[in-house]
Image: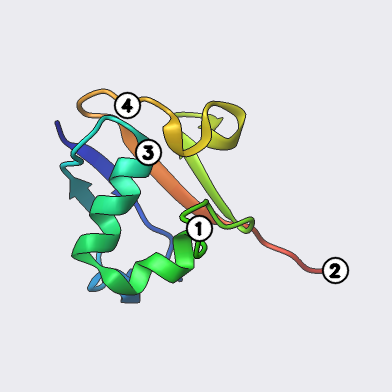
């Protein structure tokens, strides 16, 4: 199973400059995709998940138009060919 992951500009340097990566996770979940991403690109780990492996508060992950936080979080099920979009939260005033 292959899952595409689109990275924002701010994360691309930690993934060899890639705008999009294809990941073959061990399981069909968002968490397994993150584990595979972090194994291939260790510098992404602390930018995506915390020390307990939970999704960081400022990281939003979309499956189609749904934020995975509104689904099952890192346990959200995926199918072959799904595409995830990672977006950091933007704050300002």
Mark identifier at residue 78 = 4
Visible residue check, residue 19:
no
Relative image position of residue 62 (x, y in whole percent): 48, 38
Residue that label 2 marks? 93
Mark 3 vs 2: CB contact within 8 A: no
Q: Earlier in the sequence, mark 4 or mark 3?
A: 3
Tell me which numbered mark, 1 or 2, is placed earlier along the sequence.
Answer: 1
Task: Work out whether 23 lies above or below 76.
Answer: below
50 left or right, relative to 25? right
State the residue at coordinates (23%, 52%).
Answer: 36
Q: Looking at the image, is mark 1 or mark 4 earlier in the sequence?
A: 1
**Distance CA(mark 2)–CA(mark 4):** 36 Å
Residue that extends furthest to the right in the rendered view of this protein: 93
Could you say which disc has been placed on residue 30 in the image? 3
User: Image check: 66 left or right of 31?
Assistant: right
Front residue of 4 and 54: 54
Front position among marks 1 and 2: 1
Question: As rendered, which of 59 and 46 lies closer to the eye?
Answer: 46
For the C terminus, the image quarter is bottom right
Q: Which mark is residue 31?
A: none
> Is the Cβ of the residue at disc 1 closer than 8 Å to that at disc 2?
no
């Amino acid at each position: 199973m292959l899952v595409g992951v689109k990275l924002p500009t701010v994360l691309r340097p930690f993934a060899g400059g890639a705008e999009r990566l294809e990941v073959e996770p061990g399981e069909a979940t968002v968490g397994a995709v993150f584990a595979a991403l972090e194994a291939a690109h260790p510098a992404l780990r602390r930018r995506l998940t915390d020390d307990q492996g939970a999704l960081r508060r400022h990281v939003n992950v979309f499956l189609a138009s749904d934020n995975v936080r509104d689904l099952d979080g890192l346990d959200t099920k995926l199918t072959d060919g799904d595409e995830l979009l990672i977006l950091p939260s933007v704050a300002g005033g």
